[in-house]
Each structure stands twice: as C-alpha cells, then as structure tokens.
Amino acid sequence: MKLTIVEYPDKRLRQISKEVTTFDTKLHALLDAMNPMMIDTNGIGLAAIQVGYAIRVLTLNIPDEEGEQHPENLLEIINPVVIDKSGETLYQEGCLSVPKFYEDIKRSEKISIHYQDRDGKKMQLDADGLLAIAIQHEMDHLEGILFIDKLSYAKRKKFEKEYKKMLKERKKS
Ligand code: QAP
Ligand code: CO
C-alpha cells in the first residue's frame, strides 16, 4: 500500500473523519503503511486524513530522551474520545502536512482518552508530556483542524506569507 502525505492547503485536510466500525485487514494494511511512513518522514504522529483516508485513525511514536523512536512505543489509536483533561502547556509544534513551519501552541497538559485498538478492543490511556500534546494535535486532524488555525491573526498572516514563499521555492528545484 503506497501512501503520500497530503499537504496544506489541500482541502482534504478539512474533512471530518468518520468513525471506524470494521476492524478488518483493510484497516490493518492502512496502519501497517502509516507506521513506516511516519518514521521515514521523521514524524511522531500521523492521522489517516494526512494520507488521504478520512477515518478516525491515528498513529503515534514518541521518541525517547535521545530522540530515538522504538517500534515498541508505537501507539495505534482508533475512534479516540477525550474523557478528561487538565492543566496548560506550551510546545513548539510542527505537522507533516505543513512542512518546515513550527510555532508555539497552547494545549492541555494532561489528557485521558478512550479509544479502540486495531482489533476494536476498548482501551483507556492517561497521557502527559509530549504524548498528551501529540494526541491533541492528531485528534484535531479528525475534525479538520490544523495547528496553524490556532495562531493569532498576525502570526497566521506571517505563516501564509512564509509558506507561499516556501512552496514557490520548492517548485523551482
Ligand atoms: C504532531 O508532528 C506534533 O515540518 C506531529 O519538515 C508536533 O510529526 C505533536 C515533521 C509537535 C506534538 C508536538 C514536520 C517532519 C513532523 C515538518 C510531526 C517536517 C518534517 C511533524
Ligand atoms: Co499534524
């Protein structure tokens, strides 16, 4: 299964992703393709809509203190629902669908979610640190929301200008 990253300003990123109801080999094939895609592109989180599938599926792999990612830290999250959140934290976020741009975004410091694994089994997860931030970022994708939507008006304008320039430069090479 060959996947490509959908990049802003592609309208597909604005779709609301649909709940997964069948946990079949098709879903597993998508997950099995998303995981290496995320690692190969230096991602720590990826939502299915970022590879063109509007379903409520996320993969995450948070690096260790040395910045290394390990297969055993892979998290596959399907149909997530936030059941609790607390605190506030600021982190410089990026997104595989918004290449080369990073900005501080405010999120909850801790969150608890209900979700399903690749076999449809019901799970619960309490997260803090980078994992909590990444889950919130990826869950936004399910609603068609990008981290750049959370910028102030002035910062968003600066982003649009820089990003357009970046795309133009990229087209040349
Ligand atoms: C979301 O983002 C995230 O611009 C995942 O050129 C970000 O994996 C969650 C990436 C920060 C928590 C904190 C971005 C790779 C990867 C780029 C990513 C790029 C190459 C972003
Ligand atoms: Co993203």
Image (cartoon, rainbow, N blue to C red):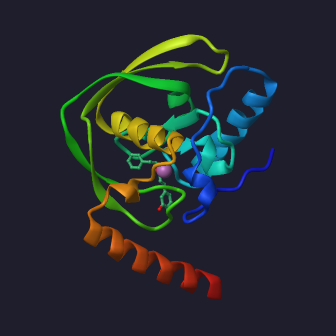
Q: From the viewer's perspective, tell me whether residue 9 is left or right of residue 128.
A: right
Q: From the viewer's perspective, tell me whether residue 29 is left or right of residue 51.
A: right
**Residue 55 higher or lower than 151, as above or below:** above
Residue 71 visible in the displayed image = yes
Q: Position of residue 58 (x, y in %)?
A: 56, 35
Q: Position of residue 169 (x, y in %)?
A: 55, 85
User: Where does the N terminus fall, quadrant-wise?
Assistant: top right
Count the labels in the image.
0
**Residue 92 higher or lower than 55, as above or below:** below
Q: Quadrant of residue 89?
A: top left
Q: Position of residue 148 (x, y in %)?
A: 39, 59
Q: Residue at x 53, y 29 (%)?
A: 75
Q: From the viewer's perspective, tell me whether residue 159 is left or right of residue 141.
A: left
Residue that sits furthest to the bottom in the current view: 172
Q: Position of residue 153 (x, y in %)?
A: 28, 67
Query: Which residue is nearer to you in this view: 172 or 53?
Result: 53
Q: Residue at x 64, y 35 (%)?
A: 55
Q: Quadrant of residue 35?
A: top right
Q: Residue at x 59, y 62 (%)?
A: 7
Q: Quadrant of residue 126?
A: top left
Residue that sits furthest to the left in the current view: 87
Q: Residue at x 55, y 52 (%)?
A: 14
Residue 173 visible in the displayed image = no
**Residue 8 higher or lower than 160, as above or below:** above
Query: Which residue is nearer to you in this view: 154 or 4?
Result: 154
Query: Which residue is nearer to you in this view: 111 or 12?
Result: 12
User: Where does the C terminus fall, quadrant-wise?
Assistant: bottom right
